[in-house]
Amino acid sequence: MTNLNCLSHKKKIHFIGIGGISMSGLAEIVHSRGFTVTGSDLKSSQTTLHLEEIGIKVYYGHSASTITDDIDLVVYTAAINQDNPELLACKKTNKDCVTRSQFLGLIMKDYKFPICISGTHGKTTTTSMLSHGLLSADLDPTITVGGILKALNGNIRIGKSDFFVTEACEYCDSFLDFFPRIGIILNIEADHLDYFKDLSHIRESFQKFACSIPKDGFLAINGELGALDEFLAPLQCQTETFGLTADFNWYAKDITFDDKACASFDVYYNDLLQGHITLNAPGTHNILNCLSVCAVCHYLEIPLDKLNTGLNLFTGANQRFEIKGKIHDITLVDDYAHHPTEIDATLKVAKAYPHNALYIVFQPHTYTRTKAFLHEFAEVLSQADNVIITDIYAAREKDPGDISAQDIVKIIHSLGKQALYMSDFDEIANYLLEHAVPKDLIITMGAGNINQVADILLGR
């Protein structure tokens, strides 16, 4: 069990934005190790109430008065503005401050096997799959995941072994603050263009992440990335590829799908059959996610049957084609997809899922992403029978005034397809109740608060 020696001289740690899914997990880890932990957030939530229940003091609202003299270290998220009163108080009193990613990197250094799952898409699901494998093998890992995992009853598990599993987000080069021994790169696509200049810039960042894995470490990487030899050239660690054909170290054969679009397949490593896997999470993309996990488990000498046992218990991460329930025999699904590639993957799952008409209620996420992929969003969404677009979820951004949800609707119309713009969630729920019929499928889609529409419907 790690003692967090890297923080031994820090006795009291304060988290600005402690209610965030990653920050809350980090706060819980150091609290469990005997540190005094406090935090602040704008409002109360289930997460902050849980933190209070385990003995962490949470302040609501941000005030300079929360930065007391006895605080040794302050951790803050990228969402915290530099004019935040608590950050300003830290600067005034010369408090040690680190970002969330820097703090996560510090924690990671105290584990023998820090495992980082990266990629533009699929991090949460793959982290969850690997977590199930490690738990099935009784390796007692510490886990921090960017979603609610049923096996953990939350997003955090505090283990007593040398295994630490986390997602590694590329936004603002956060994952370059990490110290992975084992890494996964699922995919690399254009995204977060409010920070990255272009796809080349993103690839460069992922390559730096891969180069941070030491010589005695391991990387599982999607073999279909393109210019792979060039990408791998500067790496010193052991690498293995995964994909859907025999061109790669790890691949799947004899793939079949059940009536819920969940795959079964044979797993091959260097052309040798390793065993058979049946997933309870739908979609072809989850075959690739699973193959990356197979590679890591093989490196850790976890038998495939142990991984399979764990995967049998994994039915998907929260908000990843999550079936919320039924109303009037209409199935309600919520999905986190907020990039055209993710939407396409979700629609492929939906096509294989039993239903009549498909309704998509899409909430674009950030102005930058909406503007960068405006035509791609329109093209992929036009695959659905019925499309409703609601206002852009701003997240960390301010409205630039040159892009809106209606722009997606206009392009869908220009493609000869129908789409509606609605801003009010109650209005959307009423429309769906009036138009959807039994056996239809409704998917609320996006990384903001669009899941509230399903909650409204289920409450009626």
Image: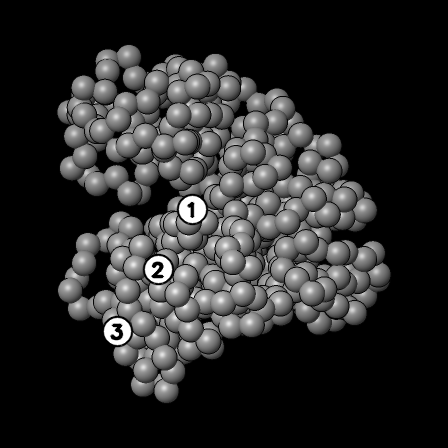
For image coordinates 51% across by 72% down, the residue present is 357
Q: Earlier in the sequence, mark 1 or mark 3?
A: 3
The residue nearer to you, when weighing 227 against 151, is: 151
Compared with 15, 398 (above or below) is below
Residue where numbered disc 3 is placed: 407
Query: Three-letter amino acid code at disc 3?
Result: Asp
Callouts 1 and 3 close, C-beta under 8 Å: no
Residue 206 at least partly seen: no
Packing grade of label 3 (10 A; few <14, some 14-19, many >=20) is some
- Spatial separation of the CA atoms under disc 3 and disc 2: 23 Å
Compared with 433, 295 (above or below) is above
For image coordinates 42% across by 77% down, the residue present is 382
User: Which disc number belongs to residue 345?
Assistant: none
Residue 41 at least partly seen: yes
User: Which disc number belongs to residue 459?
Assistant: 1
Q: Between label 1 and label 3, give the one nearer the viewer.
A: 1
Dot 1: what SS?
A: loop
Where is residue 315 shown, x and y percent of the image? 64, 49
Query: Three-letter amino acid code at disc 2?
Result: Asn
The residue nearer to you, when weighing 357 against 167, is: 357
Residue where numbered disc 2 is placed: 430
Where is residue 398 shown, x and y percent of the image? 19, 54
